[in-house]
Image (cartoon, helix red, strand yellow):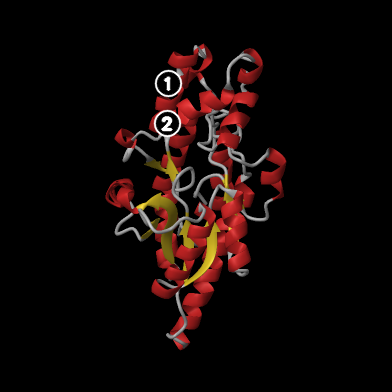
Amino acid sequence: MRSLSFLSALLFAFSLSAQAQVCEDAPSDAASALSADIRGAVSYRAGEAPVPFVKQKATLDEILRQMRARQKERKTDPSLPKLVVMIDLDNTGFTEMARVNAGLARIANQFGITEVADPSALELFPHYSKDGFFTWADKLELRTKYPNLNWNQVYTAYNGSSWAPSLDGTETLTPGLVKFARNVSQSGGVVVFNTARRESQRVTTVATLKKGGIANPKVTMKPNSGFSGSSAAWKVEAAKKIQDTWGEPIALIDETAVNRVAMTAAFPDVMGVAISIPDFTTEMSDDELAAETWAISTFER
């Protein structure tokens, strides 16, 4: 099984699904093992997914377990609030290759970094933060190859092009998100996208979620004005609104550590779930990611 190509794995999975229907919320042991084996056969560009599938599944299953337990409790006590999983968007719920491609094209042309001129030849892509960008540049040994470049300027150019307004709406949903959102709803829970994007981006952001398969998405966004705090501070503030509007937050899935730390400090019972999307760097080192209690690479389970 481990030697199967990506296409072979998909064809095998398709034939399997035609032979047997397995409940997605309570798979058999055999089906679970086979599903994990197929995922192991599908290679990402940079090799294995950053988070082992067994850890990813345990993380997502724990969220759903808590929701099912609350769903059962609400049958006898309807006054109990529903449980909410909060999901960040950029580099969490959204994967943003069009933005990355635009940024790479800019720095290839402006600074002569020819190694990134063809993104299809790369095995690793940068996170949008400066730390994530520099980690990417170091893993590709670009700062060693181009020691005379001002890499702060390189990052500024990359960031400016990747966040051009013309690219709003080009994002795609991270694999498994639609199915996981459906699992949450079936378990009596609620998904709320807790993002630090501004309200001015609401229409496009909601449209992108709907286009990807999220029906009637619930999204909290930072005001266009009147809030001067950090993104982490905003997400905590938004969580209070979420608590008043949709239910009790039990998890925040977010690739940025400072956001998770702020949330769990304000809401000690909330699971801080790290995410490291395959083929992208993050602000975390490999050791820091491995040390996270709860972590995923995609929303697949």
Q: Residues within 10 Å of mark 2 (few under 14, many from 20)?
A: some
Look at discs 1 and 2 and give the one toward the viewer.
2
From the image, which quarter does the N terminus lie in? top right
Residue 67 in percent (x, y) is at 50, 70
Residue type at numbered disc 1: Arg
Q: Secondary structure at mark 1?
A: helix
Residue 183 in percent (x, y) is at 44, 61
Q: Quadrant of residue 140?
A: top right
- The front one of 197 and 152 is 152
Tell me the tag on residue 80. Answer: none
At 47% from the left and 67% from the top, the residue drawn is: 84
Is 95 placed above or below 24 here?
Answer: above
- The front one of 299 and 159 is 159
Label 2 sits on residue? 160
Q: Which of pointers 1 and 2 lies earlier in the amino acid sequence?
A: 1
Q: Quadrant of residue 194?
A: bottom left
Is 134 placed above or below 108 here?
Answer: below
Residue type at numbered disc 2: Gly
Asked if the residues shown at circle 1 and circle 2 are in contact, with their CB atoms under 8 angstroms apart, the answer is yes
State the separation of the CA atoms marked 1 and 2. Answer: 9 Å
